[in-house]
Each structure stands twice: as C-alpha cells, then as structure tokens.
Image (cartoon, rainbow, N blue to C red):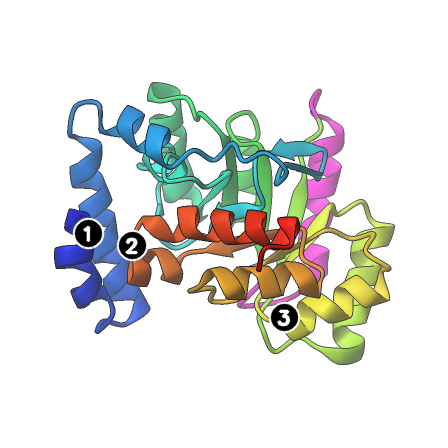
Amino acid sequence: MCLYDIIIKPLARNMDTERASRLGLKYFQLIGKIPFARKFNRLIHSNRQEGLQREVFGLKFYNPIGLGAGLDLNGELYNDLNNLGFSFTEVGPMGVNGTRKAISHIQRDAPDDIIAACISKDYLTCFTLAYDFFDMFIIDLSEDPATEETNALLESRITEQEYKPIIIKLPDYINGPELDKIADFCMMNSIDGIELRSNSQVRQVATHTAGRLPVIANCHIDTPEQAAESLKAGASLVEIRTGLLKEGPDIVKRTLKYLKNEKAGTI
C-alpha cells in the first residue's frame, strides 16, 4: 500500500473527475520531485510486458495501455506517468498556450516513451507547432465532430519529412450511420485511427471497417476487466484515466497482469 492508497484514493473516489484530476496531478507532481522516484517506479511498474507488445499506427507500443488526456494538461508529467506502466501518454487537451508549455517541458525533459498531443482547438496552429515534439496527434472533435477540420492537418503533414499519425477523437453520442460515415472518411483520407468513448462505438467501427481502422478506446475504464472488454470489442489500444485516479498507480500493473493471464488462458 502506498501513500496514494492511504490519502489520495479515498478523497478522489468522492470527487468529480475534474477535481480528482487536479488532486492527482498535485500528487504526481510531488512524487516526481523525490530523488530516484522515477527510476524506482519504472522498476516496479515496467511497461515492457512480454506478449503484450503491439504495433499500431506504425508505432511500437510495449503494451496496449495508455493514459488518457485530462490529467497531464501541459506536458509536465509524461515521464513520471509513463513510469507507472503506461506505454503512451496523451497530453492535453491543449490549445496554443498549452501546446507551447508542453513543448517547453519536452525540450527540457525528453520523453522516454510514446507521447501523444491531444489538440482541442486552433488545430492547425497547434499541429504545426507540436509536430517535431510529439509521436502522434489526437484531434479532439468532441465539441464539434466536423471531420473537415482535419483537411488542413493532412495537407500540412505532406510537407513534413517524417510521417506521424493523426487520430480523431469523437464524442459518445456519434453512432449508427453517422459513425460509419466518419469511419469511411478516415479510411479514404489517410486518417490513421479513431478514439472512441464507448464499447458499442468500438464494436461498430471494428465491424464496419473489418478491423482495418485502428481504434483507441477511452471508455471510462476503472478495472482490468473493463480494459479487457474494450480490447475484445475491437480496440487496438485502451486508455485509463479515471481508473488511475480512483484506484491508484497499481491499476496499470494489475491490468497488464490480468491481460497476460487472460492471454495465457489462466483466467
């Protein structure tokens, strides 16, 4: 049992997500200042799990578990959080100011693992600013799911020397023919993937595209069983955020152990 379990977890469980996120951020900021804490966490929460590696979007992930956006808003803690066992961290959601802050942090502390920029406004400006510093880009269309917002980004990417994945994030109310239409748009316009908020959406896209469009499931995952369910629904990767806040740092380790046991047929 760690300090998080004793003090932070009981408080976070009785807070709304935003307040819990702020409390969790303060905790991880404090822990990050302790000498050797990063190396210690990486030792006991290794993200390099035999049998769980996968290649998605042309990137190699040590395991399918990532940290969703909403906790590390300005790229202050990506290495400390990845050292809890995540294979990637989604920074943001960000506008221009947040993007500049994140770039400043990255210039001082190079990421140890895959880092994604979640951009929620001023898409093209943020995309061009951040292109050299992030491994992939999540374009958050939750407020206005208008896919034409991505056209300028796709054109901008053509001019870059290195290809980096573009994934669009959709709200949970997009379903049925509208979701099929967006999935088709992604397939036809070199959008690399889609981030979805419910397992029903994940199943629909996986079925409609025959698994050809990679999906990140960001489905309010709080338990290892829920992560496994999203992967079974057709997700290539799953993200945990509320689970980290409610259950503490061991949620990633427990989830990876569950997935390994499930793959081995011991569950």
Quadrant of the frame with the C terminus:
bottom right
Dot 1 corresponds to which residue? 4
Please, what secondary structure does the residue beneath circle 2 have? loop
Residue 109 appears at what percent x and percent y? 35, 22
Distance between the alpha carbons at the discs numbered 1 and 2 = 6 Å
The reply to whether dot 1 and dot 2 touch (C-beta < 8 Å) is yes
Q: Residues within 10 Å of mark 1 (few under 14, many from 20)?
A: many
Mark 1 or 3: in front is 1
What amino acid type should be assigned to the residue bearing mark 1?
Tyr
Residue 195 appears at what percent x and percent y? 62, 57
Q: Residues within 10 Å of mark 2 (few under 14, many from 20)?
A: many
User: Does residue 206 lie above or below 3 as drawn?
Assistant: below
Q: Residues within 10 Å of mark 3 (few under 14, many from 20)?
A: many
User: Does residue 218 lie above or below 203 as drawn?
Assistant: above
Residue 44 appears at what percent x and percent y? 34, 34
What amino acid type should be assigned to the residue bearing mark 2?
Gly
Assess whether residue 237 is covered by the magenta stretch. no
What amino acid type should be assigned to the residue bearing mark 3?
Asn
Mark 3 or 2: in front is 2
N-terminal of the pair, mark 3 or mark 2, is: 3
Question: What stretch of residues is rendered in magenta?
Answer: 141-162
User: Does residue 52 lie above or below 105 as drawn?
Assistant: below
Q: Residue at x 50, y 47 (%)?
A: 256
Quarter residue 174 falls in: bottom right
Answer whether residue 218 is visible to the viewer in this image: no
Would residue 35 be found to the left or right of residue 49 on screen? Answer: left
Residue 233 appears at what percent x and percent y? 69, 65
The residue nearer to you, when weighing 149 against 171, is 171
Would residue 203 be found to the left or right of residue 79 on screen? Answer: right
Dot 2 corresponds to which residue? 248
Q: Residue at x 38, y 53 (%)?
A: 251
Dot 3 corresponds to which residue? 199
